[in-house]
Image (tube, rainbow, N blue to C red):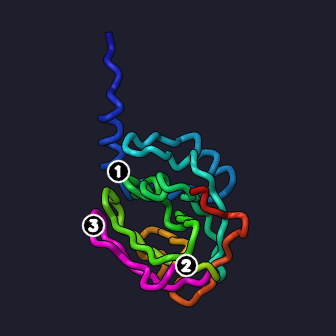
Amino acid sequence: MSKKPHLSVFLAFALLLGCAVAPTPTTAQGQKQRDQDFVKNPHRMYQLNELARVEIQIGDHKLKTWVMDENSKRMEGMMFLTNKEVQPDEAMIFVFQDEEPLSFWMRNTLIPLDIAYVNAKKQIVTTAAMRPLDETGIPSRYPAKYAIEMKAGAFKRLGIKAGMTVKIPDTLKAKD
C-alpha cells in the first residue's frame, strides 16, 4: 500500500521555494497555464483565480488588478498570499462606496507591499510602503475612494507617486 503525500507537506515545500520559482509568462497562454497550475491557498476565503480582474493604468503602465469590491473581500485583501502567488506587476484594487479617510494594516499579510490611496477624481493622494505582519495603520492622509496594493518596490520601479492620475473603469463600483 502506498501512501499519498499530505497537502500540508506539499504546501510547506511550496512555501520554502518562495521566490526561487521562475517568473510566470505574461502571455495569454502563460496565464492559462498559471490558472491550470493554481494551488488553493487554504488560509484564504477568496482565491485569486476566482476574483474579478480589471485593467487600470497609471502613467504608461497597464496593470491587471484583482477587484476587492465587497466588505469581506476588502477585509481579506492580500492576507496569507505568498511571493509565489503574486507577480511583480500584479495589483489589487480596493473599491469603496464613498470617498473618505482610509487606513490599511498588514495583519496576516506575509509579503511587503506598496499602497496608493486614490481619491474620487482618480488621483493618487498618498503612497506608502507597508511591512509584513505590521498591524500599525497606514492612513490615507486625505479622503480616498480606492486603494491599490502591489508588491513592495513596484511603485519605485514603475515611477508611481502621489499626484498621478489612475485610469480606472467607470464601471468599477463597490457592491457594499
Note whether 127 is above or below 176 in the view shown: below
Please give the range of residues in magenta: 122-143
Q: Is residue 54 magenta?
A: no
Q: Is residue 125 magenta?
A: yes
Disc 1 marks which amino acid?
Leu
Q: How many marks?
A: 3
Closest to the camera, between mark 1 and mark 3, is 3
Helix, strand or loop at mark 3? loop
Helix, strand or loop at mark 1? helix
Outermost residue, bottom side: 163
Q: Which residue is mark 3?
A: 135
First in sequence: mark 2 vs mark 3 = 2
Residue 118, label in figure: 2
- The percent position of residue 91, horizontal first and vertical second, equals 53, 65
Note whether 152 is above or below 173 in the view shown: below
The residue located at (63%, 57%) in the rendering is 53
Distance CA(mark 2)–CA(mark 3): 22 Å
The residue located at (50%, 58%) in the rendering is 23
Q: Quadrant of the C terminus?
A: bottom right
